[in-house]
Amino acid sequence: MRIVIYPGSFDPLTNGHLDVIERAAKLFDKVVVAVARNEGKQPLFSMDERLDLVRACIRHLPNVEADSFDGLLVDYVERRSAQAIVRGLRAVSDFEFEFQLALMNRKLSERVETIFMMPKDTYTFLSSRIVKEIARLGGDVSEFVPPDVRVALSGKLRHCAA
Ligand code: ADP
């Protein structure tokens, strides 16, 4: 069974993430979307909220599941008996950081491969950070995120403003 881990903060999941998930689901028997705890990043959505949103948005994909993880990614990959990590590459700007991360993960575990996938061109400018910024300023994000995420964003920001 070929299992791939797609790690990230997913704060929140965007259509760009979903595009990578759908592509990976065609190549692997199982894709595990692994939501990182990442306390340093001060996420807008809690771990449970991010996980619930990912679960809601992958309902249509039978070989995709969501999970959370803490600690070293390569240890999690081993625990899940996965063969690879998938990461999205949007533009050259992503490359240096992703290259560093992939080589470091290889140093930590020779067995784990990192695979890069490019999203559909219309999603290359998308990031969770930009989506949150647009939503915060009252812009329409329905083109950029799945409907469940759009609803959660407007609920969260209404709550924050109150
Ligand atoms: P991180 O916390 O590592 O920044 P993110 O949740 O933002 O994680 O993203 C996880 C992965 O998804 C990263 O590999 C990132 O490059 C990729 N990614 C983020 N947005 C997009 C997008 N619009 N298209 C393709 N890949 C993306």
Image (cartoon, grey):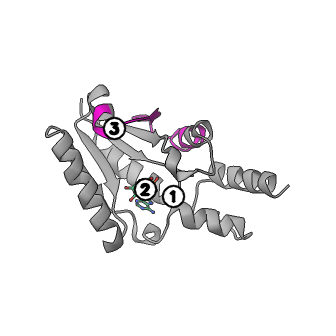
Residue at 69 percent across and 54 percent down: it is 153
Quarter of the image for residue 76 reads: top left
Ligand 1 neighbours mark 3 (CB distance < 8 Å): no
Ligand 1 neighbours mark 1 (CB distance < 8 Å): yes
**Could you say which is closer to the camera, residue 118 or residue 130?**
130
Quarter of the image for residue 110 reads: top left
Say if residue 136 shows up in the picture.
Answer: yes
**Amino acid marked by disc 1:** Asn
Reading the image, the residue beneath label 3 is: 72
Q: Secondary structure at mark 2?
A: helix
Tell me which image quadrant ligand 1 sits in. bottom left
Give the label, 1 or 3, closer to the camera.
3
68 in the magenta segment: yes
Name above or below for residue 20 compared with residue 28: below
**Could you say which is closer to the camera, residue 156 or residue 149?**
156
Classify mark 3: residues with Cα within 10 Å, few (<14), some (14-19) or many (20+).
few
Name above or below for residue 89 compared with residue 79: below
**Could you say which is closer to the camera, residue 123 or residue 97?**
97
Reading the image, the residue beneath label 1 is: 15
Which residues lie in the magenta part?
52-75
Give the percent coordinates (x, y) of residue 59.
Answer: 53, 38
Give the percent coordinates (x, y) of residue 38.
Answer: 48, 45
Classify mark 2: residues with Cα within 10 Å, few (<14), some (14-19) or many (20+).
some
Which residue occupies the extreme right position in the image?
Answer: 162
Decide which of tag 1 and tag 3 comes sooner along the chain. 1
Q: Secondary structure at mark 3?
A: loop
Classify mark 1: residues with Cα within 10 Å, few (<14), some (14-19) or many (20+).
many
Residue at 69 percent across and 49 percent down: it is 152
Which residue occupies the extreme left position in the image?
Answer: 110
Name above or below for residue 23 compared with residue 120: above
Say if residue 27 shows up in the picture.
Answer: no
